[in-house]
Image (cartoon, rainbow, N blue to C red):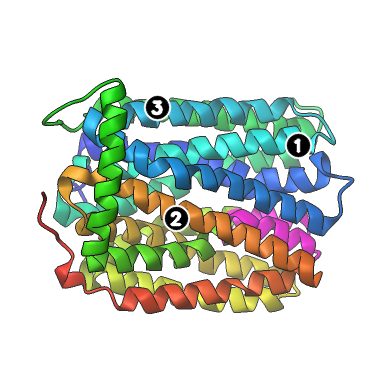
């Protein structure tokens, strides 16, 4: 393990520790609960589910449109760290702003959540691209897994503290669970800011042969995006992988964002749902590291296919669950594979792409991943409303996992390293 834990790797991985607090406490945990029971308390359950799905879709749409161009600009202008910082600041500020939104103000809450999610996802475009800067190619599987593992540990640690605050506010000098949730949003903003500092100080911006600035970098970025479309069409393994990733990560992201809402809708208690999320985080820490090792042993592609198989089984079971203990067991199963499928997808894609266009190509990677997050929550929300059944909405995710696995099986991994232009 010492081979991987260099100062740049540790600093890079700690950004995952930093921003995962948003993914756990806000995106997956308290926001769906607070939105349904506090900000949107007067709304019908299926309507609030639809609005939550729509909010996630709007945030994802922005990344779909902006990520490729911003990635190209970052490559040509040496701006990866600056763009990461700007998007992270947007996420931090808007997350803190959620603490000031009053009861019934669902529109204001949703607007801040959308902006914070844009900051979270936008920063990840440039964070992912820095993987190729901090580690050697033969170490990408394991280093990528270390990032996700620290994310699960850090996000789970703060989430655990936040849950304790809501269960026993008196112990923290707070008046109510409502006040505890508000302080939880502030704690996420502080945590995200503090643990982003190592990356900013210790990870170097990769050198650029012909650095551009001002309007020139925008024009060059736009031209490079068009070139990337042509490259992707010519690189069949890259094209197939991106299409597969677009489908299967849709199911993964939708489960992350809608699991608590789904559990509430089928009658499970809030405290058990939050507890299950904590279980996922702490199971995910060692499991992500295990998948990094597995990817080195059997290949990232096979590891991803195993994880997709688990997700298919989990989704089928989720449609049928009735008891609280089943939700906990499902949380364990998801924790075993969630970090693994994300880590191995990132490291496999890093092997597909030209080394001089990393941020740009990761812009497309994140674009497709977030376009999936646009489609998935919206699909679950629309089908839930149309059928008046949250279970039928969740069942629709099976199609995405199956189609994604089939396309991934057709990617010829031995042909994935293209020659740089």
The x and y percentages for residue 197 are: 37, 25
Q: Are marks 2 and 3 in contact (CB under 8 Å)?
A: no
The x and y percentages for residue 243 are: 38, 66
Q: Residues within 10 Å of mark 2 (few under 14, many from 20)?
A: many
Which one is nearer the viewer's eye here, 153 or 220? 220
Q: Would you say the magenta stretch is mainly helix, strand or loop? A: helix
- What is the quadrant of residue 186 in the picture? top right
- What is the quadrant of residue 98 in the picture? top right
197 over 300 or under it: above or below: above
Q: Which residues are magenta?
A: 255-277
- What is the quadrant of residue 79 in the picture? top left
Mark drawn on residue 12: none
Q: Which residue is mark 3?
A: 85
Q: Nearer the viewer, mark 2 or mark 3?
A: 2
Helix, strand or loop at mark 1: helix
Q: Residue furthest top?
A: 214
Q: CA distance from mark 1 to mark 3?
A: 27 Å
In the image, taking residue 397 as reference, residue 309 lies left or right, namely left
In the image, taking residue 322 as reference, residue 313 lies left or right, namely left
């Amino acid at each position: 393990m010492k081979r991987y834990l260099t100062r740049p790797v540790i600093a890079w991985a700690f950004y995952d520790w930093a921003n995962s607090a948003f993914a756990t406490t806000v995106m997956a945990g308290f926001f769906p609960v607070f939105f349904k029971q506090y900000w949107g308390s007067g709304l019908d359950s299926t309507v609030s589910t639809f609005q939550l799905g729509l909010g996630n879709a709007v945030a994802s749409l922005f990344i779909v449109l902006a990520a490729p161009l911003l990635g190209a600009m970052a490559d040509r202008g040496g701006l990866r760290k600056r763009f990461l910082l700007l998007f992270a600041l947007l996420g931090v500020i808007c997350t803190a702003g959620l603490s000031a939104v009053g009861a019934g103000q669902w529109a204001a809450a949703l607007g801040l959540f959308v902006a914070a999610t844009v900051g979270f996802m936008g920063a990840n475009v440039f964070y992912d691209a820095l993987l190729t800067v901090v580690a050697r190619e033969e170490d990408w599987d394991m280093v990528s897994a270390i990032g996700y593992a620290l994310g699960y540990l850090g996000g789970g640690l703060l989430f655990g503290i936040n849950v304790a605050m809501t269960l026993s506010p008196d112990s923290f000098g707070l008046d109510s669970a409502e006040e505890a949730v508000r302080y939880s949003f502030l704690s996420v903003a502080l945590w995200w800011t503090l643990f982003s500092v190592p990356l900013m100080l210790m990870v170097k911006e990769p050198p650029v042969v012909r650095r551009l600035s001002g309007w020139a970098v925008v024009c060059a970025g736009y031209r490079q995006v068009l070139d990337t479309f042509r490259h992707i069409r010519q690189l069949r393994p890259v094209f197939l992988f991106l299409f597969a990733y677009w489908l299967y990560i849709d199911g993964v992201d939708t489960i992350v964002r809608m699991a608590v809402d789904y559990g509430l809708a089928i009658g499970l208690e809030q405290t058990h749902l939050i507890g299950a999320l904590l279980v996922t985080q702490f199971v995910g820490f060692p499991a992500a590291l295990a998948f990094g090792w597995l990817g080195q042993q059997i290949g990232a592609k096979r590891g991803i296919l195993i994880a997709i198989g688990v997700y298919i089984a989990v989704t089928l079971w989720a449609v049928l669950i009735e008891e609280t203990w089943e939700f906990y067991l499902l949380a364990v199963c998801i924790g075993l594979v969630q970090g693994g499928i994300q880590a191995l997808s990132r490291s496999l894609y890093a092997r597909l792409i030209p080394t001089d266009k990393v941020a740009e190509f990761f812009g497309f990677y994140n674009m497709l991943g977030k376009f999936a997050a646009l489609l998935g929550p919206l699909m679950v929300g629309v089908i839930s409303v149309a059928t008046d059944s949250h279970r039928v909405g969740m069942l629709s995710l099976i199609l995405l996992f199956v189609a994604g696995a089939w396309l991934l099986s057709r990617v010829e991994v031995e042909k994935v390293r293209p020659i740089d232009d």
